[in-house]
Image (cartoon, rainbow, N blue to C red):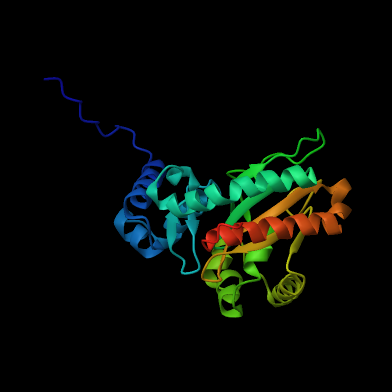
Amino acid sequence: MDRRPVAQRPKQLLGSVDNTLRLLQMLRDTGALKLTDAAEELGISPSTAHRLLSMLVYRGFSVQDESRIYHPGPGIVANATADSAYRRLLAIVRRHLATLTARTGETSNVMVRVGTTTRFLASEEGKDLDRVSSRAGEILPARHTSGGQALLAELDDTILVQLYRSRSSQASGEYLDSEQFLRFRKRLDLVRLTGSALNLERTERGVAARGMAVHGPNGEAAAAISVAVPSARSDSLSSPAVLRELTRAVGACEAELSGDGSG
């Protein structure tokens, strides 16, 4: 009977590469990882572990929540059971994205927030040649995307402080000083007041978007939907027509998430 040969340890082992691969295995197998546990398991300093984990976050292989816990990112859980909740969300939202794009003529997106990032789950591209391309699979700073701002506006100040005024935010590059944080909170106040958030070239030159939060049965924000346009057409994002269709899509998704088939 043929047996698979046992992999041999390379003679010239690259320590940083090996540690990074071991972190990927730990994230895959445990589903949650503390910085201190990672450092202890690998026998490296917390600062070194943080640098490695930060690179995994940057490349989409890990995400960090408000408790500073690392979880598998889309790079390693695209087909895993950990994404089952997102699958149900997508099954509901995709049809409404298609309708939203058909009625506005513009690209629409659905995204979720993980820590200080937004993960784009799906996009429906507009038909115009001059359109915003799909953002599906991208991970961008939540405080810059329209959907991310809509989701952050749902959080208590205590959580916002953890996300943007803590030591972990300094390490991740998301730290805001007192003046920046004050301006950020005022921006979120406006989002709460108007019910939607605007992104004018904050994430990409030449792109603008408006996003709204989608709430689940328990009233908590489950995701956000946005309409994205070339910045030359950014005025359309404030038009009654786009606001009406975006609000309609959000309402339809919320109705289905709550179990009301009328959506």
Q: Viewer-proximal residue, 190 or 50?
A: 190
* Residue 199 is at least partly visible in this image: no
Q: Residue at x 46, y 43 (%)?
A: 78
Quarter of the rendering containing residue 7:
top left
Q: Horizontally, is 172 left or right of 199 in the view? A: left
Q: Quadrant of the N terminus?
A: top left
Residue 92 is situated, as x and y percent measured from the top left of the image, at 55, 51
Residue, far left = 1
Q: Quadrant of the C terminus?
A: bottom right
Residue 93 is situated, as x and y percent measured from the top left of the image, at 59, 51
Residue, far top = 1
Q: Residue at x 38, y 59 (%)?
A: 32
Residue 247 is situated, as x and y percent measured from the top left of the image, at 72, 60
Q: Residue at x 57, y 79 (%)?
A: 158
Q: Horizontally, is 245 left or right of 55 in the view? A: right
Q: Residue at x 43, y 46 (%)?
A: 77
Q: Viewer-proximal residue, 152 or 259?
A: 259
* Residue 44 is at least partly visible in this image: yes
Residue 213 is situated, as x and y percent measured from the top left of the image, at 65, 63
- Total marks shown come to 0
Q: Viewer-proximal residue, 41 or 58?
A: 58
